[in-house]
Image (cartoon, grey):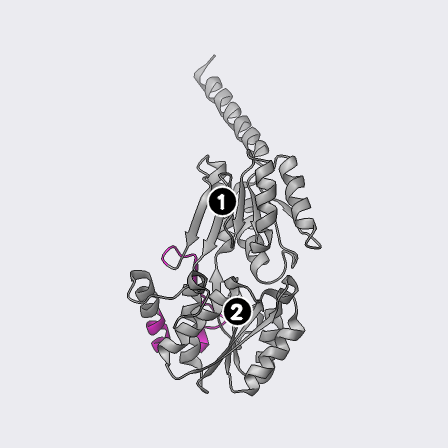
Amino acid sequence: MKPMLKAAAAAVLSFSAAIAAAEDFQPAVVYDTAGKFDKSFNEAVYRNGAEMFTMDKGIAVREFEPQNEEQREQGLRRLADRGFSPIVAVGFNYSSSVEKVASEFPDIQFAIIDSVVDLPNVQSIVFAEHQGSFLVGALAAMASETDAVGFVGGMDIPLIRKFACGYQQGAKYVNSDIEYFENMTGSTPAAFNDPARGSELAKSQISQGADVIFAAAGGTGIGVYQAAADEGVYAIGVDSNQNYLQPGTMLTSMVKRVGVAAYASWEEAQAGEWEGGIKVLDLGADGVDWALDEFNEDLITEEMQTRMDQIRADIVNGTITVHDYTATSSCDI
């Protein structure tokens, strides 16, 4: 065979192998009941994870959106039974389902965000939410004119207490005398999708003097942001960059790069480098941060940004230690 024909044949074989490999690789994601367009946690996984992976790799990510809590396990098992892997489960609510299904399908790779499942075929991805929340708490104290800030959480669980405690620490780091208000929306997963209640809680805090409110509450936060806009105070978004939702009202957002984490799990598996175990994404690993963009840049002075850069650096280098609520089940500050 002539050299040019050999080269062409090799290229065809290489291309065919790439197509076969792409067809064999079947990544998947299961969102929580709020759905992939919740403008928060799930949507960050969709926009920066599934959608981006498909655009970059040309490989579709199979998606499942449960309509109720019972469908979580059903969706996981159906995907595993059909050979999809890795399957990324979005949120701590999947803990028991992932543990059960992953035990039944030891050859399938699973990843769970915001929880730890101790199985060799599970990648547990957790974040240093307390560090990111410290940052936005510090910014809230810098921006507050009333020396009072608020926090509205979703479901009252240790993870959300972790956000609240970090936020309170950051605010008091900047202003030790600042007044702090805190409310949790409820005790069930429905607390993450109740904008009306979020609005009520925000207005209550505003009536007590809070002029910056951080919501770590999923879809409930939409009500918090609207109340802040209506009352002329600041709000802080969570998980994805929500600055665009209420420009001029959103002081910043505490971003958790959950989409990037999901993308990485799929990419590692495709490259044959996937490993089970715990992955901790902290401030130093850019797993969490505060958002500065065209929607809030007019609200952040040069002095504020300089101080935020220093606080961020001090957390990363250990000069500032941020207490993790989940380490002691208390906010020791």
Give the structural element (helix, strand or loop) at label 2.
strand
Residue for badge 1: 118
Nearest to N terminus: mark 1 or mark 2? 1
Which segment did they paint magenta?
284-308
- Looking at the rendered structure, the secondary structure element under dot 1 is loop
Q: Position of residue 85 (x, y in %)?
A: 57, 38
Place of residue 230 in the rendered image (x, y in percent of width and height, measured from the top left) = 61, 82
Mark closer to the observer (1, 2): 1
Distance from the alpha carbon under mark 1 to that under mark 2 = 31 Å
Query: Residue placed at 55% from the left, 33% from the top?
Result: 107
State the residue in front, 211 or 111.
111
Q: Residues within 10 Å of mark 2 (few under 14, many from 20)?
A: many
Query: According to the image, label 2 marks what residue?
Result: 237
Answer with left or right where residue 228 lies relative to residue 126.
right
- Mark yes or no: residue 253 visible: no
Q: Check residue 305 for magenta coloring.
A: yes
Name the residue type under label 1: Asp
Residue 125 drawn at (x, y percent): 48, 50
Reply yes or no: does residue 233 show up in magenta. Answer: no
Label ID, residue 47: none
- Dot 2 amino acid type: Gly
Question: From the viewer's perspective, is residue 61 above or below residue 180?
Answer: above
